[in-house]
Each structure stands twice: as structure tokens, then as C-alpha cells.
Image: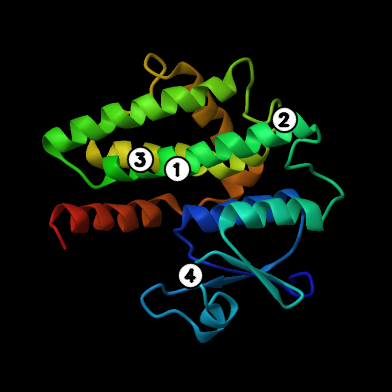
Amino acid sequence: MAEKGVKLFGLWASPFSLRVEWALKLKEVDYEFMDEDLQNKSQELLHYNPITKKIPVLVHNGKPLAESTVIVEYVDEAWPNGYRIMPQDPFERAQARFWARFAEDKCVPAVFNVSINSGEELKKAIKEAQEVLKTLEKALEGKKFFGGETIGYLDIVAGWMPCWLRMIEEIAEITVVDAETLPLMNAWFDNFLEVEVVKRSLPPKDKLYAFNRARREQFLSGQ
């Protein structure tokens, strides 16, 4: 049963919803997941997030929060006991936020461009994505995870990539991240996907692949 007053409005196939789920599960917070139809959003979602009308939205004791990165930080502070998501050191905490913003501003659009292109545009998108990921890789130097020996804030924010980018590679029959081109990122992909909370939370592979294959085909057809 969900902890009193904890609801997460999201979409089963959304990597942004998944970030919040990882944070809640690391904190061992029970919650009720409200799976939204983004073509026909519920009145409850629109009530709780009238500004952007987007998922995810966390509702805790009647108070709503939007934007996945903001929610992850809130979860760490609202349930301070147990697993630490944000670094305790102020400098390390600032660094995690800096790289998280880089991942949001640069990596998300770069990987998205890979997923929606073909031919020469796809080759260009792959190169650009590799350049961006090479920069993010600097934050992994000397570490197993961005958070050190265990996953932390930046791992959660960037954690959609090991699953979604691998999926895009398979669907489009391409390679973006491998041991030769991006060795640290490639190792992190493997390590992240072995984390128990991550493995337990990922949607069924066949269902997720079918969903994203259809989206890619839709983009390629210009619809």
C-alpha cells in the first residue's frame, strides 16, 4: 500500500517518470503510480500541474511537484533517512547539479536526434551524441558510478540512457556507445543496468521496444 499521500503521475514508458520511481524506491517510499494517457490527460493531472501539464508529477500530502530533477531532489530531502541520493559535500552536490544540467541540456536532445533520423542525418547525429557523451564521461573518471561506488543524483538523472540508448542502437542497427569509443560510459551503462532497483523498475523489454520502434517509424515517416 502506498504511503499516505504519495502519488506519482507518470507514463509507464517515460524515462522521466522512471527517474522519480528510482528515487522513491531507493528511499523505500511506497507510492501509488498513476499511469497517464498523454493524448487524453486526466483532470487530476491537469489540476496538479496546470502550468506545463506534463508528467511526471509527484503529489505528497496533497502538495504537487513537477519536473523530474526537482522531484528527485525533493524526495531525497523529504525522506532524509536511509539511502543518500545527493552528495553530502556542498562542492560535490554542486558538481552533481552542474553535470545533471549538462545531461539535460545536451545529452537528451543529442540522443533524441539519433532516435528520429536516418541516413546521413543519422550519421551526423551519432557523431554529435558521441561528442556530448565524451564530455559527460569526464564526470566518471576514476569512478564506477557518477555517485562513486553507488548510484546517486547524476546517475538517476542520466540513468535513462543505458536502457533507452541501447534500445535505439538495436532498433536502428547502429552503435553509439562501445568500449572503444566511450569506454567509461560503456562500463557505466553495464554497471547501472545491474543495479537491483534499476532492473526491478524497467518496463518489459518487448513492450518498451515496440513502443519506441513505433515512435521512431512515426518520426521517420514525417507524421
**What whole-number distance in Å separates the C-alpha atoms at marks 3 and 4?**
23 Å
Label 2 Cα crowd, 10 Å radius (few <14 / some 14-19 / many 20+) = few
Task: Indicate which disc, 3 or 4, sits on the residue closer to the N terminus.
Answer: 4
Is 71 situated left or right of 161 in this image?
right
Q: Pointer 3: what residue?
A: 111
Task: Indicate which disc, 4 or 1, sits on the residue closer to the N terminus.
Answer: 4
Dot 2 falls on a residue whose secondary structure is helix
Task: Indicate which disc, 3 or 1, sits on the residue closer to the N terminus.
Answer: 1
Dot 4 falls on a residue whose secondary structure is loop
Task: Indicate which disc, 4 or 2, sits on the residue closer to the N terminus.
Answer: 4
Q: Nearer the viewer, mark 2 or mark 3?
A: 2
Nearer-the-camera pick, 115 or 97: 97
**What whole-number distance in Å separates the C-alpha atoms at marks 2 and 1?**
20 Å
Tell me: residue 188, above or below residue 49.
above
Q: Residue at x 54, y 78 (%)?
A: 45
Task: Indicate which disc, 2 or 1, sits on the residue closer to the N terminus.
Answer: 2
Quarter of the image that includes the N terminus = bottom right
Q: Which mark is residue 52?
A: 4
**What whole-number distance in Å separates the C-alpha atoms at marks 3 and 1?**
11 Å
Tell me: residue 191, above or below residue 60.
above
Quarter of the image that includes the C terminus = bottom left
Q: Pointer 1: what residue?
A: 105
Q: Pointer 2: what residue?
A: 92
Mark 4–mark 2 CB contact (< 8 Å)? no
Q: Residue furthest bottom?
A: 43
Q: Residue at x 60, y 43 (%)?
A: 156
Is 42 situated left or right of 147 in this image?
left
Q: Is residue 194 visible?
A: no
Which image quadrant for residue 122?
Answer: top left
Nearer-the-camera pick, 101 or 35: 101
* Rendering coords of residue 141 (x, y %): 59, 17
**What whole-number distance in Å separates the C-alpha atoms at marks 4 and 2?**
31 Å
